[in-house]
Image (cartoon, coloured by chain):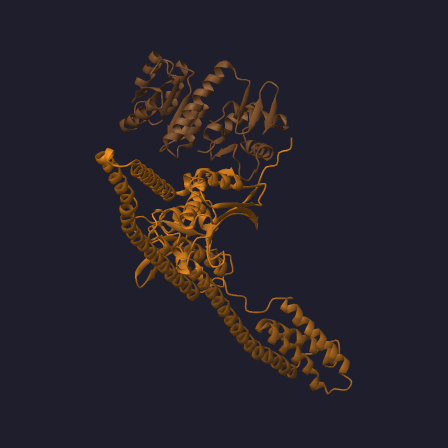
Chain colours: A brown, B orange
Amino acid sequence: MTDSNPHVLVIDDEPPILRVLKSTLVTSGLKVTTATTAAAALQSVAQAAPDVIVLDLGLPDMDGKQVIQSLREWTEAPVVVLSARHDEEERIAALDLGADDYITKPFHMGELQARLRTALRHAERRGRGASTYSGHGLEVDFERRLVKVLGQEVSLTRKEYELLCCLARHAGQVVTHQQLLAAGWGGTITDTQFVRVYIGQIRQKLEADSSAPVLILTEPGIGYRLRTDDEANL
Amino acid sequence: MKRVNEDILGITAHPVPTFRAGPNPYLVAMLLVFVATLISVATVWWLAPRNLSLPFIVAIVLSGVWYGLRPALAAAVVAFLSYNFFVVAPPLAFKFEPVSLIAVAGFLTAALVVGAMAGQLSDHANAINDQLRRLTTLLAASRDLSAATTVPDVAQSLAHHLKSGGNVEAAIWSAAADEQQLLAATEAATAAGVGPAANLKSPVLSGITADFRGLRTVRGDVGLAAVWADRNAVTPASRDWLEALLQLGAIALDRASLAEDVSEARLVADREGLRTTLLSSLSHDLRTPIATILASASSLAEYDSRFDVATRRELLNTIQEQAERLNRYVANLLDMTRLESGALDLKRVLVDPVEAMTSALEHSRRRLAGRRIERVFTASHVMISVDPVLIEQALLNILENAAEFSPPGSVIRASVSLENGEAVLAIADQGPGVSAKERLQIFDKFFRGQADRGHDGGVGLGLAVTKGVVEAFGGRIDVESPVWEGRGARFVIRLPARQAMEVNE
């Protein structure tokens, strides 16, 4: 294992979960540090500067949202949140506070690994200021404001483009209704129905069958997610 | 108390008007006498003078028949004067002689006899009318009281009928001695400030003297009523009517409280029954996957190198499958608890039913592998007000059920349409279907159908959760079967639909 291997910090207060995650992630070529408390995690972030962080929201010593805020004071590294199924509010709050993605417990290891890859790739793209996105037959050229599906140019309205752009910049990650509202309307509108209507229009234009969307996926109660090549057949 | 009762009954203080309403009786009597005078004067040339009193007699009798004693007497006096002045010679002059006393006596006797008889008849008729009215109000009250199902409803109905039938104001309390509750009060009673507990020692409410009556049946006290009537109101009520109505109310209150006791008892019994089924379900639906996982994992740990690759693969797949099954079961168990802990804190947002259905289909893609999915979405610009996570779980459970019971290669048809202002989300499969008997129980908690035997789906809770979710958001769920050439089942969810927002750029 070399230093070029991405470094992941896993924060969870359940040792069995940590054991499984550590052995699997190490096997898949990541450098893994673990922490069972928020305090230990923050210390570890300060010392080791991980490339990506997996954070369980239910830590014994600090509220999950607070942990994210503290982490964001130290690092820009992507944070993937682990949460229980019914914590939508908590999850949305985490995403709006700067978490990059979430995954609900219990999860498939493959799913977590895909999310971690997405997060790492995303951080790297942000690092070099990527000007295009492509995946799953969809191409977005951020500089020329061009959108293509299977090589065919698609014309979108300005708002539709802003929303797709926001999804594409976070491709593979969940984007909340609030984040999409901010991207499309600059926070002047708070009614999530607008997002729903526009996503419907974008689907009409991009999806082969808009009644069975495969590009833009709905995350019930949270927001939307653009599917990447990575999880094409997950 | 006695004095108050008299007031309530209104009989002594306010006699019911005995005679028919309409024009002033005395005026009509005078008019009749006037007509009689005209007739007498007109016929004086051919009738014998002694017969000339006949029209006057007729006028007096008619006054008596129509209006009773006093107008008849008035008619008699005026008739005599008029008779004497106009008819008896010499005309246009009074002439009193002993013989005119006969006419006076005759007229007055006619008035007295007819008036008294008519008065009696009229009183009698009025009494019968009153009786009829009271019986009618009692009948209406009895009907309403027996239709009311809860104790407060019964009390409300009783107060309503006291007021509308007899203009009696009332407040009604429950009988429970330790925590007396105000069940119902008429508007005036509320205005008088009746409190949550009746104060028997002081029957005066803001200056009103009320009469307290215990509502009693053979089972004992069931309530307490305070009743009073407005002094100036004409009340058709009588003591018997009030007593009868209060007695009807007491019986209805007793029945309602008995019914509440029974349903409470049934609830307890249901809960007991549920606990038993819950325990047996838990031991089956939790233990089976745990046992399988434990067995597979421990044998892998023990015989690792002695298993061939295929066997190892199979054991690992089993562990994964069973863990997923366990996860589904726990998710449903949690949803059920969530629903039963009260619908008050249910989250509601506007959700596109088509989006809910596509999302559920997407999330059960792996589970539905090998089935042909047909999508028929005709509802557009329609929203439902639900918790998006719960409604997806509701749909996932139906899809899970369809996946469990339909053969590979068969069709699963998902549809979303708008019918009569309702969003209709339906999922049809080509499985064995649901028998008429099972259709009644399929949504019961922990129910396992005939076809379940030999399946390891562990969906005993799934359809119950689906039903719970749908009903929590004001919808209904039904299952139709067979739907495809004698096979298959179609689960239909109907939820109140709303018009979706239109956005024009």
Q: Quadrant of residue B320?
A: top left
Relative depth, front residue between B105 and A209: A209
Relative vertical location of residue B195 with respect to residue A203 in this rendering, above or below: below
Residue B44 in view, yes or no: yes
Q: Position of residue B363 (x, y in %)?
A: 45, 38
Numbered marks: total: 0
Identify the image quadrant of the N terminus of chain B. bottom left
State the residue at coordinates (49%, 67%).
B136
Relative depth, front residue between B141 and A53: A53
Q: Position of residue B157 (x, y in %)?
A: 45, 57
Relative depth, front residue between A169 and B40: A169
Relative vertical location of residue A121 with respect to residue B204 in this rendering, above or below: above
Q: Residue furthest left?
A: B302
Identify the image quadrant of the C terminus of chain B. top right
B230 left or right, relative to B118: left
Q: Residue furthest top?
A: A47
State the residue at coordinates (57%, 25%).
A139
Q: Position of residue B415 (x, y in %)?
A: 53, 47
Residue B494 in view, yes or no: no
Relative vertical location of residue B363 with respect to residue A151 in this rendering, above or below: below
Q: Position of residue A172 (x, y in %)?
A: 47, 27
